[in-house]
Amino acid sequence: MASKTKIKTKTKKNKKPAAKTARVKKAVKKTAVKKKPKAKTKPTPKIKRIAAPAATMAPPAAPVAPPGTERIGVVTHYYSHLSVAIVKLETGNIRAGDVIHIKGHTSDFTQPVESMEIDHVHVDEVRPGQSFGVRVQEHAREHDVVYKAKA
């Protein structure tokens, strides 16, 4: 005779009827903490700004040129890995050998112009309206003003 073994099947003992779980959910909703409505606050009034009369407002301060120099241009770009400043010449001419003074918020130095280039071509003289590259001894920054020593 063969022995009989019982095969156990899984039964779900903790299964709750659907109606009972719905009642529990309703009870949880009733006991949940209700949020307090936010207190109403008055909007802050806008402040009206009155412009000062034009006579009392001072014009922006013009940069003061170092003595014995005249403003000739502005640094438009600086290549730190080459130590080259790109200068946009506004007034006057500049030649190799002239002494320039570069002054800005954090830079202030004087040096002679050894060589200049326009579009990678060496030039001896630059005229107003042209942008040129000049090798500088110290770090120059955009918007630094370039002055030329008066002869």
Image (cartoon, rainbow, N blue to C red):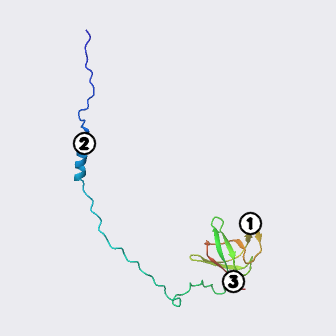
Q: Mark 2 points at which residue?
A: 21
- For label 1, the SS is loop
Exactly how many numbered labels are in the figure?
Answer: 3
In this orientation, which residue lies closer to the viewer: 116 or 142? 142
Q: Is residue 103 left or right of residue 18?
A: right
The tag earlier along the polypeptide, 1 or 3, is 1
The tag earlier along the polypeptide, 1 or 2, is 2
- Residue beneath the point at 69% across and 83% down: 149
- For label 3, the SS is strand
Q: Name the residue under label 1.
A: 120
The quarter holding residue 17 reads top left
- Taking the view exactly as shown, the residue that stands out farthest to the top is 1
Q: Which of marks 1 and 3 is in front?
A: 1
In this orientation, which residue lies closer to the viewer: 132 or 54? 54
Q: Mark 3 points at which residue?
A: 149
Q: Nearer the viewer, mark 1 or mark 2?
A: 2
Q: Residues within 10 Å of mark 3 (few under 14, many from 20)?
A: some
Q: In this view, does 125 lie to the left or right of 136?
A: right
Name the image quarter holding the C terminus: bottom right
